[in-house]
Image (tube, rainbow, N blue to C red):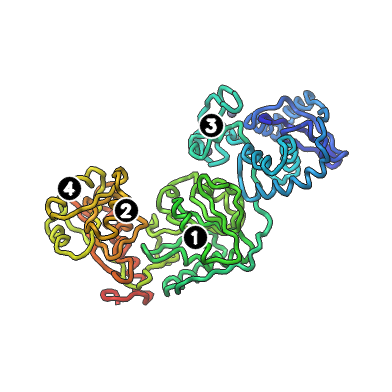
Amino acid sequence: MLKLQIISTTFPAGHKLWVARDPQGISQWSAGSERHRAMGQPLPGDEVYQRLSVLQARGPLGSLARLAAALGSQGIAPGPGLGDPGHILAAGLGILQEAVAGRIVFQDRLMSLLRDEGLWPLEAARLLDYASYHGLVEQLPGISRLSWGALRCNRCGGQNVVFEPCPVCRRRECPLCTDCLTLGASRGCRILVSAPFSGKAFSGEADFTLAYQLTPAQVRAAAQLEEFWQSPSQRTLVWAACGAGKTEVTYPLMRRALREGHQVLFAVPRQDVVRELAERFRSAFTGVEIAVHYGGQPWQAQGQLVIATTHQVLHFYQRFGLAILDEVDAFPYHGSEMLRFGLIRALGPKGKLVEMSATPNPVPRKGTAVTIPVRHHGYPLPEPEFVKSRSGEIPPAILKLIEESPHQWIVFVPTVAACEELAAALREKLREKVAACHSRHPQRHEEIKAFRYGEKRIIVATAVLERGVTFPGVQVVVVDADHPVFSRSALVQMAGRVGRTADHPSGTVVLCGTRKNGAIKGAQAMIKQLNQEGAELGLLKGEGYA
Ligand SMILES: [Zn+2]
Ligand SMILES: [Zn+2]
């Protein structure tokens, strides 16, 4: 079954060339009026499809190739029967379609699922041949050769392909994609099977309840998203202030899409966020089945509302009427051709895409994005102040501010070395406990805990604390804010740690550096732009923007 055979089929109304796994089984399911001949030898997937494209080519070369192949073609002796073929088709097709609809999956994975469902490998092979002959599923090799000679991976769209000895097909040179290796090898000899999601998944009852009310800024954004749904536009961006609550803003839009029978994807970068969202969605939504997809989860989990890590988009095929992508400015989605390719393929033909970010790149022009400029408490975002300082140092005035302040402080630094060094220096200067937190710190979770429970007032941290954490009442200093590791987005996110809760809606953000570079200016401008917009819309409380 590793090798595939080109079949030439003639039937009363015409002729077609296609690819089968089990030529001897064709007579079991084909109509009596069809005549099948095998063209050439069985070949590995990439070779068979390359050969097929030669045979299907228009013009004299194609005609010549077809003529030569027809001369060398052979009749196919029927293989053994496997019980009642009609019964196998009737029982198997439903299972196959449920497994493949809206997905793209390697044949070996699909085969093992069909085996778990009680189909013998040969039955499954015949079923797949039947389905592909009748256009119920599509199939492609893992790697294809494009017409201009380049190789392309059909799973991820990548073109970084190497030739290696292959443990699967035993060829000495089997093409292998290096772009998506982390998802398991995509090889020339592996076959991808896919089918668009065509049926309507009826969720007319879908609804949600929230334990709290949406803020005026959220209500406005939610209404804009529903307008987007009805507009001809295919794509929109949600730009939300850090901590403004963009997830729940999408609920009315998701409900609408679900009620109209669409499948909905909500994708986020990290697994822990997927799990957290699944809990939130399960308690908020009723009348809809929720499927959760991340590495190591059963890939065939069913549900109209799919929550997945961003990488999982590569497993879906023309499935979603609506896809919502969070943190599009961050790893892994930002700049990834592969995930963009996968996302476009995961959307149905008229599918719509909502991208969300607290720090979109580039910054959208006014009126081109759905904005949520104000946090739930209604106070403006703390605007970062730039203080000129020597490299690696907290300037004396700021040190004094930290020393005399009753608040907790996060001191962000660009590197692990700077983190250890500055934490030690602060312990000595301020004579108090200072936590340190970076990716290589063996006790970083304990350090964060000590800070969270107020056992330590100051934490020196690298970018690990940049996103997704809330410490009520915290203030922020960024040391060496002009260091190249700190992008504009990173600075906005770090500033976004301050003033998140209603009890402490404001606070201080200081960016220290030898010079005010583009990232610092950009971060200041971005935060100011949101505050101004919030003020113009009359959504802000507090002074300064009234
Ligand atoms: Zn191979
Ligand atoms: Zn690939």
- Judge depth for marks 2 and 1 and give the one in front: 1
Residues 33 and 201: in front is 201
Identify residue for label 2.
465
User: Where does the image place residue 255, in percent across and percent down from the top left?
Assistant: 57, 66
| Label 3 neighbour load within 10 Å: few <14, some 14-19, many 20+ | many
Give the distance between the C-alpha atoms of the residues marked 2 and 1, in whole angstroms. 23 Å
Dot 3 beta carbon under 8 Å from ligand 1: yes
Identify residue for label 4.
424
- Judge depth for marks 1 and 3 and give the one in front: 1
Tag 4: residue type?
Answer: Ala
Left or right placement of residue 405 versus residue 537 in this view: left
Q: Are the residues tagged 2 and 4 within 8 Å (C-beta)?
A: no
Residue farthest to the top, as pictured: 172
Give the distance between the C-alpha atoms of the residues marked 2 and 4, in whole angstroms. 19 Å
Residue 95 visible in this rendered orientation of the protein: yes
Identify residue for label 1.
279
- Judge depth for marks 3 and 2 and give the one in front: 2
Q: What element carries label 2?
A: helix
Q: Quadrant of the C terminus?
A: bottom left
Which comes before the other along the chain, label 3 or label 2?
A: 3
Q: What element carries label 4?
A: helix
Left or right placement of residue 83 versus residue 346 in this view: right
Dot 1 beta carbon under 8 Å from ligand 2: no
Identify residue for label 3.
176
Residue 269 visible in this rendered orientation of the protein: no
Give the distance between the C-alpha atoms of the residues marked 1 and 4, in whole angstroms. 40 Å
Which comes before the other along the chain, label 3 or label 4?
A: 3
User: Where does the image place residue 281, in percent across and percent down from the top left?
Assistant: 51, 62
Residues 465 and 387: in front is 465
| The image quarter in which residue 265 lies | bottom right
Number of numbered discs on residues: 4
Give the distance between the C-alpha atoms of the residues marked 3 and 2, in whole angstroms. 37 Å
